[in-house]
Amino acid sequence: MQTYKYNNTSKKALLVDIEAGRELMIQVGLEEGFTSKNTIVISQFIDQLLNQLEKIYVTD
């Protein structure tokens, strides 16, 4: 998993990654089902990214 230094550029990169992951999760969910293993793995990865984002905003 990629880690981010806490600055405006990394916040933007993290937000872009979260959005890309969300779009991928929806696509995979529509193709394989929203409870498929792949959809769940992507969802868990997005959760990790969101947790990183929360840490950035808490430390600001």
Image (cartoon, rainbow, N blue to C red):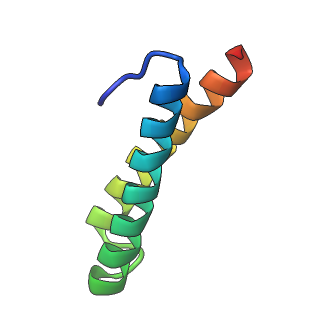
Which residue is located at x 46 percent, y 27 percent?
A: 10
Q: Quadrant of the C terminus?
A: top right
Q: Quadrant of residue 23?
A: bottom left
Q: Quadrant of the N terminus?
A: top left
Which residue is located at x 50 percent, y 38 percent?
A: 12
Give the tally of numbered discs: 0
Q: Is residue 33 above or below residue 58?
A: below
Q: Quadrant of residue 5?
A: top left
Q: Is residue 56 above or below residue 38?
A: above
Which residue is located at x 53 percent, y 19 percent?
A: 7
Q: Is residue 59 above or below residue 24?
A: above
The spot of residue 55 in percent (x, y) is 62, 23
Compared across the picture, whether 4 is left or right of 55 comes to left
Return the residue nearer the eye: 13 or 40: 13
Compared across the picture, whether 29 is left or right of 60 comes to left
Return the residue nearer the eye: 44 or 7: 7
Instruction: Kindly give the residue lying farthest to the front in the view shown.
Output: 9
Q: Quadrant of residue 45?
A: top left
The spot of residue 41 in percent (x, y) is 33, 54
The spot of residue 46 in percent (x, y) is 45, 48
